[in-house]
């Protein structure tokens, strides 16, 4: 019986990205027994990704010890966690029935979710969000992703597409966004926006700030003001206990945090921000597979 219990408690968490596909095999308490990173096929079509996933699942679970699979994909899924609705940076990803495909190939029940939702599930389970019931995540990378947990549960909205926090309006006359919006938070807080504004990479600006370079420090202060203004809208609507900041740009968290906090304190009434904590994500690139494993456990836990 003990062995059956151990076997039945293992799940696979998968994070599908445009350059890499990451997998982990986890126990129900969050212990990662094995992890694997594969190069994403190019072009990253749904059929090519499926083939890589099937091969990788066989590698990471050679003895068929897992009972379910969770997958994070770069775009919204349907509310049932079955269909990858769209991934604007991956070719051919429109209404892809990825859960059905993987179940047919592996025989394991599968749930899918937006990759930012998975990252927040991971941070809420084993990372920076452990002690909070109401929190949001912003992932500051090529774009700006977001996710929301309310009363301990992931909030995805009636169609599964809620939590696109990077697409809220920051400047009605700002740069055009791929979403169709204009002047979205993403157009000010993403790595793409930083490159457009400074002609430098975020990591380069972080190194310059570490060295005390005045222009870089000024840039991060201005960046923090923009981010703080965007967060102001989210705080008034959601009044989270914590905001977790992840993604590659969060490596410069210390340089933009003071300006973010100052902007929020200036713009948000004390009652709406009472006790609010702004925290760097803790799990890094691991968050996606941790959260995907948590997704599988939440959907299909047997105990």
Image: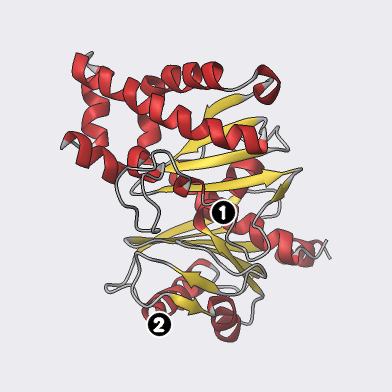
How crowded pointer 2 is (Cα within 10 Å; few <14, some 14-19, many 20+) is rated as some
**Is 200 left or right of 209, judged from the image as shown?**
left
Which residue in the structure is indicated by mark 1?
Answer: 118
**Residue 232 shows in this picture:** yes
Q: Give the quarter of the figure containing the C terminus.
A: bottom right
Which residue in the structure is indicated by mark 2?
Answer: 47
Q: Give the quarter of the figure containing the N terminus.
A: bottom right
The foreground one among 289 and 209 is 209
| Percent coordinates x, y for residue 163 in the rendering | 57, 51
Furthest toward the bottom, the residue is 104
How crowded pointer 1 is (Cα within 10 Å; few <14, some 14-19, many 20+) is rated as many
Name the element at disc 1: helix
At horizontal 65% and vertical 23% (from top left) the residue drawn is 273
Upstream in the sequence, badge 1 or badge 2?
Answer: 2
**Is 33 left or right of 195, judged from the image as shown?**
right
At horizontal 64% and vertical 57% (from top left) the residue drawn is 156
At horizontal 45% and vertical 71% (from top left) the residue drawn is 56
At horizontal 64% and vertical 20% (from top left) the residue drawn is 269
Q: CA distance from mark 1 to mark 2?
A: 22 Å
Q: Quadrant of residue 65?
A: bottom right
| Percent coordinates x, y for residue 2 in the rendering | 81, 61
């Amino acid at each position: 019986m003990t062995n059956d219990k151990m076997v039945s408690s293992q799940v696979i968490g998968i994070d599908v990205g445009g350059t890499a596909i990451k997998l982990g095999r986890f126990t129900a308490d969050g212990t990662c027994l094995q992890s694997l990173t594969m190069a994403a096929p190019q072009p990253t079509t749904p059929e090519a990704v499926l083939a890589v996933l099937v091969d990788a699942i066989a590698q990471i679970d050679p003895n068929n010890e897992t009972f379910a699979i969770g997958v994070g994909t770069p775009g919204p899924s349907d509310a049932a966690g079955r269909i990858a609705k769209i991934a604007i940076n991956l070719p051919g990803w429109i209404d892809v029935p990825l859960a059905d495909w993987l179940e047919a190939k592996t025989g394991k029940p599968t749930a899918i979710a937006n990759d930012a939702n998975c990252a927040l599930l991971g941070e809420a389970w084993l990372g920076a969000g452990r002690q909070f019931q109401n929190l949001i995540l912003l992932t500051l990378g090529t774009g700006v992703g977001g996710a929301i947990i309310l009363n301990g549960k992931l909030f995805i909205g009636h169609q599964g597409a809620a939590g696109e926090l990077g697409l809220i309006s920051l400047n009605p006359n700002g740069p055009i966004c791929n979403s169709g919006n204009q002047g979205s938070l993403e157009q000010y807080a993403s790595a793409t926006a930083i490159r457009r504004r400074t002609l430098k990479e975020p990591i380069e600006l972080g190194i310059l700030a570490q060295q005390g370079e005045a222009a870089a420090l000024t840039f991060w202060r201005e960046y923090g003001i923009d981010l703080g203004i965007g967060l102001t809208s989210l705080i008034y609507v959601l009044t989270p206990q914590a905001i977790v900041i992840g993604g590659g740009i969060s490596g410069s968290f210390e340089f933009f945090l003071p300006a973010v906090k100052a902007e929020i304190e200036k713009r948000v009434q004390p009652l709406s921000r009472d006790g609010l904590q702004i925290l760097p994500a803790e799990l890094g690139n691991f968050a996606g597979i941790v959260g995907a494993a948590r997704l599988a456990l939440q959907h299909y836990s047997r105990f």
